Image: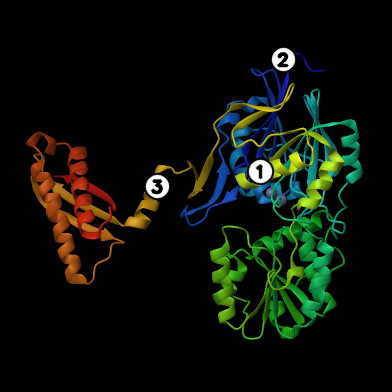
Amino acid sequence: MASKSDELVFLPLGGSNEIGMNFNLYGFGPPHDRRWIVVDLGVTFGDQTTPGVEVILPDPAFIAEYADKILGIVLTHAHEDHLGAVAWLWPRLKAPVYATPFTAFLLREKLREADLLDQVEIHEVPLGGEIDLGPFHLELITLTHSIPEPNGLAIKTPLGTVLHTGDWKIDPEPLLGAVTDQDAIRKLGDEGVLAMVCDSTNVFVEGVAGSEAQVRDALVPLIGQMTRKVAVACFASNVARMDSVARAAEANGRRVCLVGRSMHRMAAAARSVGLMQGLQPFLTEQEANALPESGVLYLCTGSQGEPRAALARIADGAHPHVSLGAGDACIFSSRVIPGNEIPIRNLQNGLADRGVRLYTERDHPGIHVSGHPCRDELAEMYRWARPQIAVPTHGERRHLLEHLAFARDLQVPQQVAPRNGDMVRLAPGRAEIVDEVPSGRLYVDGGVLTPENGEALRERRHAAHNGMVAVSIVLDKRGRVIVGPEIRALGLPTEDDDELDEVLDELADAAEKALARLSGGDRDLDDTVETAISRAVKKASQRIWGRRPVVETTVLRV
Ligand SMILES: [Zn+2]
Ligand SMILES: [Zn+2]
């Protein structure tokens, strides 16, 4: 029973301005005393704008304040954008974690690496299982996606039921795992769905995403045409795809060799839940080398051009055991994730340069299908669930707004598209944004969690663009120069050594003059001297190069 002051709220802290780092909160209770559940806790990845930062997390500061009110962290599936942040942020949230067996297997591995396995209470929930968390009663609904065990959540509360879809599509032949449990969704619809919080990734794409079975059907004849070595790149987490590639290889008399750590990790996770059975054992890289070229298929990580992944090393000729050359084939059973265009292009150019023939989704449309719902599938889901409120998530702003318009066209009575940090009251009354809480991103920078655009990264970015000048000077106690100023310029161009000497002299001159301008008393203060010199050297650099490098001045006293 709900009391009069109870409210049901939805609060995305990630995943609602961008694709990635899904971090959703549901709150129940009076505004001053809510109980919370967390649905998913994922990461996103850095790019050229975040040098040295590979992993980006949602900022949990708001909910960490209420950590004792979090009843549980529920993971819908094992993709990094849904579970990758658990090992980083769990110490700030400290709630029990709920996941189905495949997801739990991968989570345990991550927690073991982070030395947290003993501390985190993990509840393994069967597919189609239920979870009771205070006012929240959750039922897992089996969906289809591009990883084993994707779950939607029916979140039942005294103020109504929310269908939180997680990532999904409607795959009539997912190959591994069950088909979408549409009966369960229809039944929820019959009982009444207050709100559906739904995947927006492919809202701009007409039709349907297509089935894993189609991919298998396309791969068998394609691989059959090949006479030399074949490499296939796909996401390791797409176990159905790995399985299809392996079966397509065997159908053509080829043995499979997994290349890349995450391929092995996912294969182990898949076997732990009884998937990928009835295949010949995978070969080691050395065993594969002993076979004729027409007898082997390499299943590789690195379809997104990740620089340290297997395929990038093969393209560089830097892989210790696997090489591809003239006449060999590389099939990209994957799509280009927005943002990865440049590394993928570099990777493909590298392979092409070796004479490797490339097969991509663009020229061979059957070799990849998306894991997210296109417009026909979204419409179907709305027909099944019939929610009162549509809440788009898992997309950039343009996806969410398009999804909102789509739901309006489907006659969903209310639609609301919160940004990260917008708290939506779903009940009672009309759905509306009632509060805005702090949200943002944290960077994993050299193993340290830092605020987005923190000092270290700002400085690194600045140095990357503008170079760096280091000034050292030795003064006596009264501020008279004993040695220096010594100048070193890093990442700043000069035509030749003579010009370099001239430039360094000019900078040293600027430093000396800045020191000379200081009064006797100011020269006693290291900070004042450092600031004055740095400022003058920056100015001189501006004159010389037209840019302002990072300037670091060190004063030593003798
Ligand atoms: Zn996702
Ligand atoms: Zn996913």
- Mark 2 highlights which residue? 5
Mark 1 packing: few (<14 Cα in 10 Å), some, or many (20+)?
many
Image depth: mark 3 or mark 2 in front? 2
Residue that numbered label 3 is attached to: 458
The disc placed on residue 400 is 1
Judge from the rendering whether residue 350 lies leftward or rightward of residue 7; answer left or right: left
Q: Mark 1 CB in 8 Å range of ligand 1? A: no
Left or right: residue 32 compared with residue 97: left
Quarter of the image with the N terminus in it: top right
Residue type at tag 3: Arg
Above or below 30: residue 296: below
Q: Give the structural element (helix, strand or loop) at label 1.
A: helix
Eye-nearest disc, 1 or 3: 1
Which amino acid, by three-letter code, is at mark 1? Leu
User: What is the C-alpha distance between the residues marked 2 and 1?
Assistant: 30 Å
Identity of the residue drawn at 55% across and 76% down: 350
**Residue 30 in sight from this viewpoint:** yes
Q: Amino acid at mark 2?
A: Ser
Q: What is the count of numbered marks?
A: 3
**Mark 3 to mark 2: distance in Å?**
45 Å
- Residue 202 position, x and y percent, is 71, 52
Give the mark nearest the N terminus, 3 or 2. Answer: 2
Q: Residues within 10 Å of mark 2 (few under 14, many from 20)?
A: few
Q: Is residue 57 left or right of residue 5?
A: left
Q: Is mark 2 within 8 Å of ligand 1?
A: no
Q: Residue at x 61, y 70 (%)?
A: 311
